[in-house]
Structure formats: C-alpha cells, structure tokens
Amino acid sequence: MGVVEVNCLAIGIHIDGFINEASRCILVSLNKLIVVSTGLFNSTELSELSKETLQRYFKPLVIALMFILWIIPAPIVNRLDLKVFGIPLLWFYYLALSIAISLTLTLLYVKSRGGNIG
Amino acid sequence: MDERAVVASTILFSITGASIAIGVLAARGVKALRADTYIVAGRTLGTVVFFLNTAAVIYSGYTFLGLSGYSYTYGAATIFAWGTSLLGYSLGYLTAPRLWRIARDNGLLTLSDFIMWRYGSRLLTIASALTSIIFQLPYIQLQIRSVAIIVDSAAYGSLQSMHVSIAVFALVMAYVFMGGMISIALTNVLLGAIMLAAMLGGSWAIIIKYFGSLGGLYEAVERVSALHLVMPGPRGDRPISWFITASLGTALGFWCWSQRIQSLFTAKSSRTVERGMVLGSWYYVLGGLWVTQLGLAAIAIKAAVGHADYTFLRLADQAFGPIALGLVASGGVGASLSTAAGLLLDEASTLSKNILQYIFKDKLSDQRLVWSTRAMVVGFGILGIYLAYTSPALLVDLLLLGYAGVTQLFPALFLGLYVDLNWREVLVGLAAGLATVTASYLWNLEKELGIHSTIIALAVNLAALAFLRALRKKNNKLAPYASTDLDSTFIE
C-alpha cells in the first residue's frame, strides 16, 4: 500500500503517465481492498489482475472519473462566498474542469498514439 | 432601412450567400450519386472537415443564442450545458470509434440501421426511426426561428424576418437536395469556422470592453443580481438536483441524436473519429464556455435585450455597432443552417431507409433510395416551415423536450454495445421511457420533482429493461444474445 501511496504522491511524474498512474493507484487500491476482505488472491496474482484490469478498463475508468468529478462536487462548490481570481467557486470549478476534460481527452489520444500526435 | 441595418444585413447575407454557394457548387461536383455518398459522404471525410462538420451539425442556434439567453434567465444552472457537450465528447471518445467500425463493416448509414443490425427487429427499428424523426422535428423548426431572430436583429426590425428566414432555409433545402452530405460537410467547414470565431471573439471582446476581465464580470453581476451566480438561480427553480440530472441526462443523450450519429459515419477512419472527439471538446471550450457568460454580462450592464434569446446580438450591437452585429449574426445563422441541413438529411434518410424501404420490402434500388431521400428532404423542409409559422416557443424548452425523447434510445444504442439485450427488452424500455417523457411534459414533473425529465424517463426506461432482462435470465425462455459479429468487432 505504501508503494501505491508514493506513486500517487510522486510530484515529478511525466504528464503523459499521470492519468495512467492515477488510474493504477485507484485500481490497485480497490483490488487490495477486495483481496484483504476476501483473502482470494496472493500478491503475484493481484499484480497480474491489476495490469490486465487496467489495460481493459483504463479509458472507461478515466471517463467515469470525469462524470464523477462533474456531478459529486456540485453541492460543495455551489457557494458565493468563496472566489478564485475574483470568480465564484462554482463558475471557476466548472471552467477549470471543462478545460481539464478537454486536456484529458487530448492526453488519452496522445497516449493511444504512443506519444505521437497526428 | 437605416444605414446600420444595411451594414449588418450586407455582412450577414454576404456570408450566408457564400456558404450556400459552396453547398451548390459542391453538389455540382458530385457525378454518380450512390446512397452512401449522398447520406454519409462515402465515409471519406478527413479530420478537419469531419470535425468542423460535426461541430456545425451539433451546435445550433441553441448554443449560439440559447446559451446566453438561458444564463440571462436562469443564471448558474446554464453550466449544465457545458457538461452536456464535454461529458458527451468523453462518452463519444470511448464509444464512437467502435460505432464507426461497425457502421463501415456493415454498410450502416443511419442510427436506425445500427438498431436493425444489432437487434434484427424491424419493429424496434421502426420505433427507433419514428422516435428520432418525431423528436428532431421541433429542432428543424427551432433553426428556422433562430434565423428569423437573427435576421430581425441584423436588420433592426426592418425586414419581414420570418419570410427571409424561410427563403434562406429553402436555399439550404436546395443544396441538401442536390448534394446531400457532401454539400453539407463542405458548407459546414466555413460555417463551423465562422461560428467559433464569432463565439470566441465576440464573447471575449464584450467581456473585455465592459468588465476588463472575467473576474470583473462576476463582480459586476454580484452587485446587480448575485442569485444569477449560484443555484437555484434567480427564479429559484433550478436546484442542484436539477443541475446534476440535467448534466448527466443530456450528456448520456448527446450522441442519441440520429443526425449526430450520421455525422460520425462520415469519417474516413476510426482514428479520424477519435481526433474529432478531442477537437470537438476544444471547440466547445473555446466557444460555448464564453458565450454562456454573455447572459451574465447583459444582467451586469442592465442591457435591454428584449427577448432573452436576443442577448448575444444585442450586446454585440451595443458594444461595437453594426459591423460586429453582422459578423455575430453570420455566426448565428451559420450555426442554425448547418444544423438544419444535417437534420433534414438525417430525417429524410431515416424515413427512406428505415421505414419506406421496409414498406417496399427492401426492393428500393440504390438510386431510388437516393431519390426517395431527396423527396423526403423537401417534405421535411416544408413541414419544418409550417411548424415554424404555427408553433412559436422558447428555444431551449423545445430542445429539452427533444433531448428527453431521443435519450430514450441510449440503452438501444450504447448499452447494446456492451450488454446482452434483446429487442423485446429494448422496445419495452423505449416505450416506457417515451410514455414517461410525455407524462413528465403534461404534468410538469420536472418542476415538481426538481429533476430533469431526461433522467426521470431514462430511469423508467432502464428499470423496465432491467426487469425484463432479469426475467429472461431467470426463466431462460427468451432468445439469448446471439450477435457474434458484435463480439468479434469489439475484441481489440
């Protein structure tokens, strides 16, 4: 679990690998949780499972994360007393998230092309 | 007609005339017309043409005029529309390349073609075709009314705007009739570029002129009407629950519009589709996000906009005069006409290919299919004109009813890509969803429950579908999932 946390917090990570790492962290953590609660797999099997699951569900997971980030924080950011650069938090959050979604789609595309645009 | 009206109208009609000329010239360049050439441009569009064509087909008078009008009326809840597009493109990035590959491998031209291929049921295919046709009809009418609003503004009320709008629409109908998707796509390259320039340039020019920065805009709005900056908005009828369900529901329904699926099928490769999704999201970030702010700008400067849908045009005129008004109006007319053209072709081809073809027991030849589609283009055009004259209503309200309707195709289209559904389950779900849309509209459930009607109906649709599927699994009496083509297509 410690390795997972270090990976999650690593600052100097290459931007193209960031989404990959973040997704891996979530999946590995989820799998560990399942393993701990059920005792079904050993650590080697877990590693194999994670890699395979990640490859299969990487894109859907990232897209699902976008939906979650759009929906869940809405009640939290819907306030007028907090501002960022003079912009109310609600508007700032969704402006930033909109740009982040486009950026993420771009990175997903670049990643699928092996880092080459075109 | 005064001098200002002459300047703005000249710019508007010059650009509109140029785009129609492109459509007509493109049609003349097409010699032997096959059904796939006429309906999906022979699946030959490269990245730039594909992306601008798709953006122009998707973004209509609603984006151009309705967004600023909506934020003027409802304030912060308008942000749901950003989610519609951006989450919609995300969903498209995930699923559209697969849909495209299926369409190419099986010669599919319409959304209802996909339904037929996937479920093998004529009844479900006709139900899906009728759903698309009925709920898209108000959308054609919407575009005609948008053009009338824009002409009215650009001519400062000195022209019979509805008559001019009908005349322009008839010219669009002519080039769609002649060249089909090829004419639409090439015209939309110009229109899509003009729309983006008008949305991005126009919005920021107005914000900078009046407020100096985005922060300045919000500070000014807070002084005049702070309720516009948070939900439930100035009228108190757009709570967080509405925002969440509207974002989710319309994002899931983003690709359920038949004309959008048809525009996907025009790409020359699945990579082109992927690139189109990425570029489309940036198109919205550069255009849609900022045009929304103009409703707030109008509130802040207490502009006399008259009807909410006039907001962008009034602000452009007030800030920079008739030249700016003419340019913005051109973008608005481009947005409406490009969508109307795509809708006309889609409605016509769906009726010809997915309903008439079955009535004639698949005996329509390729050439006859093209000609029946052409005849339907004219038929739907005339129907749209009739509705535009007889059924005036607020732009966004009409769109939202359409959204709730077409989103009921979501299980058939997207769940069907991944889950073993059969046609009976999908059909019952669709019927339940559509009945709920109607009930929601009649009894105003959206306002009563504070939940967007798209989600209410989709929940009923999915519940009915899931119940029947569970029953099938339990009894194992209905036909099991049998589409081996689908399985092989999805193994990557």
Image (cartoon, coloured by chain):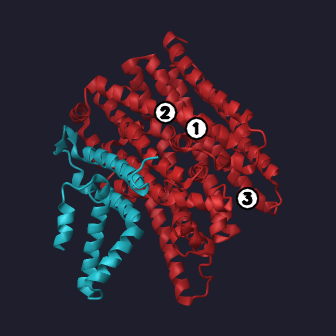
Q: Give the structural element (helix, strand or loop) at label 3.
A: helix
Residues at discs 3 and 1 both on one chain: yes
B61 and A16: which one is in front?
A16
Tag 2: residue type? Met
Q: Give the structural element (helix, strand or loop) at label 1.
A: helix
* Mark linked to residue B370: none
- Which class describes the residues within 10 Å of circle 3: few (<14), some (14-19), or many (20+)? many
Residue at screen point 39% across, 68% down: A55
Mark found first going from the N terminus, 3 or 2: 2
A69 on left or right of B305: left
Tag 3: residue type? Ile
Position of the N terminus of chain B, as image quadrant, is: top right
Task: Specify the quadrant of the image occupied by residue A85.
Answer: top left
Q: Give the structural element (helix, strand or loop) at label 2.
A: helix
Mark found first going from the N terminus, 1 or 2: 2
Q: Chain of mark 1?
A: B
Q: Is residue B427 above or below residue A114?
A: below
The residue that mark 3 highlights is B355
Q: Is residue B71 above or below residue B370?
A: above
- Where residue B140 appears, as percent x and y from the top left, is 60, 42
Q: Chain of mark 3?
A: B
Q: Nearer the viewer, mark 3 or mark 1?
A: 1
B306 on left or right of A5: right
* Mark linked to residue B338: 1
Work out how far the residue at label 3 is from the one at label 1, CA to CA, in angstroms.
25 Å
- Where residue B249 appears, as percent x and y from the top left, is 43, 58
* Mark linked to residue B195: 2
Q: Is residue B77 visible?
A: no
Residue at screen point 53% across, 57% down: B97
Cβ atoms under marks 1 and 2 closer than 8 Å: yes
Residue at screen point 48% across, 33% down: B195
User: The chain shown in red is which?
Assistant: B
